[in-house]
Image (cartoon, grey):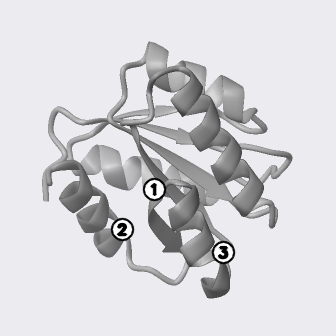
Amino acid sequence: MSLNGKRILIAKPGLDGHDVGAKIIALALRDAGADVIYTGLRRSPDYIARVAVDEDVDAVGLSILSGSHKELVEETARCLAELDAGDIHLFVGGTIPSEDHDELRQAGARGIFTAEMDLDEVVAAVEADLNA
């Protein structure tokens, strides 16, 4: 697997203070060759979108465990679009019920990852999407 030359922003939107999963994903993506930027905890969708544009990333990965994934994905996608950055790929991971997947895809999520997924599977899916 290779994400060489790809820039990916990993972000923790909302009030969720648990970032172990986000850091694990960031390391896995880095190990696959991506240049990874991590925003830290409790960032607003507007802040995330601005950093994504400023850092000229190919993708934004949102890590959400708080249950507000639908709202945060929608808001982040809206903020990216307002900055003429709707072409940045948007992924979401965390505690996400399967019944919300269709709605998240409609909101702009290109990939949805849960804690049960193998890291290699997540990295391969991100790579396939970014290299398509």
Residue at 37 percent across and 70 percent down: it is 119
Q: Nearer the viewer, mark 2 or mark 1?
A: 2
Question: Label 3 vs label 1: CA separation?
Answer: 16 Å
Q: Which mark is residue 44?
A: none
- Amino acid type at circle 2 is Val
Where residue 124 appears, as percent x and y from the top left, is: 24, 66
Where residue 130 appears, as percent x and y from the top left, is: 23, 49
The quadrant in which the N terminus is found is bottom left
Q: Earlier in the sequence, mark 2 or mark 3?
A: 3
What residue is disc 2 on?
122
Q: Is residue 16 visible?
A: yes
Q: Which mark is residue 96?
A: 3
Where residue 117 appears, as percent x and y from the top left, is: 44, 80
Using the rendered view, name the quadrant where residue 127 is placed: bottom left
- Amino acid type at circle 3 is Ile
Question: Label 2 vs label 1: CA separation?
Answer: 8 Å
Question: Label 2 vs label 3: CA separation?
Answer: 15 Å
What residue is disc 1 on?
25
Tell me the crowding category of disc 1: few under 14, some 14 to 19, or many 20 or more residues within 10 angstroms, Cα based: many
Using the rendered view, name the quadrant where residue 123 is placed: bottom left
Kind of element beneath mark 1: helix
CB within 8 Å, label 2 to label 3:
no
Where residue 35 appears, as percent x and y from the top left, is: 30, 32
Q: Is residue 45 above or below residue 93?
A: above
Left or right: 100 with respect to 131? right
Left or right: 42 with respect to 104? right
Q: Nearer the viewer, mark 3 or mark 1?
A: 3
